[in-house]
Amino acid sequence: MRVASKQAYICRDCGYIYNERTPFDKLPDNYFCPVCGAPKRRFKPYQPAVTKNVNDTDMRKARKAQIKRDEAIGRALPIAIVVGVVALAGLYFYLNSTF
């Protein structure tokens, strides 16, 4: 007997959690989110335990806000690295020109 993985997937656009009987990997590539219509590629694995009221509107909005915060941190990191490199380069040139 085969045991299906209970891995849940979350829509990055609206926070909908796919936790159905059919494994997410077995869904066709043209699968769309039933709430917002996002394509299958906009889903990512979801780790926390899934509860009964997981797809209520308020719960989806809270998850969507958390996803946006997580993605914003990921977008800000390259900017912080560039600012740090520029600051170090400026310090290097300042110290070499004064001594």
Image: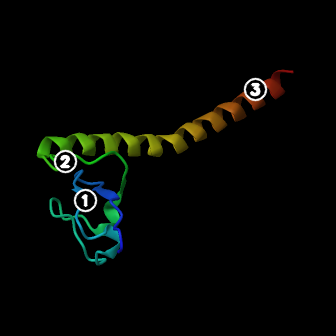
- Please say if the residues under marks 1 and 2 sit with CB atoms less than 8 Å apart: yes
Identify the colour scheme used: rainbow
* Mark 2 neighbour class, 10 Å CA radius: few under 14, some 14 to 19, many 20 or more: some
**Of callouts 1 and 3, the N-terminal one:** 1
Q: Amino acid at mark 2?
A: Val
Residue that carries the numbered disc 2 in the rendered image: 54
Residue that carries the numbered disc 1 in the rendered image: 19
Percent across and percent down for residue 94 are 75, 26
Is the N terminus in the top left, top right, bottom left or bottom right quadrant?
bottom left
The correct choice, above or below, for 13 with respect to 38 in the image is above
Q: CA distance from mark 3 to mark 2?
A: 56 Å
Nearer to us in this view, 99 or 49: 49
Nearer to us in this view, 38 or 17: 17
**Of callouts 1 and 2, the N-terminal one:** 1
Q: Which of the 4 quarters of the picture holds residue 23?
A: bottom left
| Residue 47: image tag | none
The correct choice, above or below, for 88 with respect to 48 in the image is above
- Please say if the residues under marks 1 and 3 sit with CB atoms less than 8 Å apart: no
Q: Residue at x 33, y 44 (%)?
A: 68
Q: Residue at x 18, y 42 (%)?
A: 59
Q: Amino acid at mark 1?
A: Asn
Secondary structure at numbered mark 1: loop
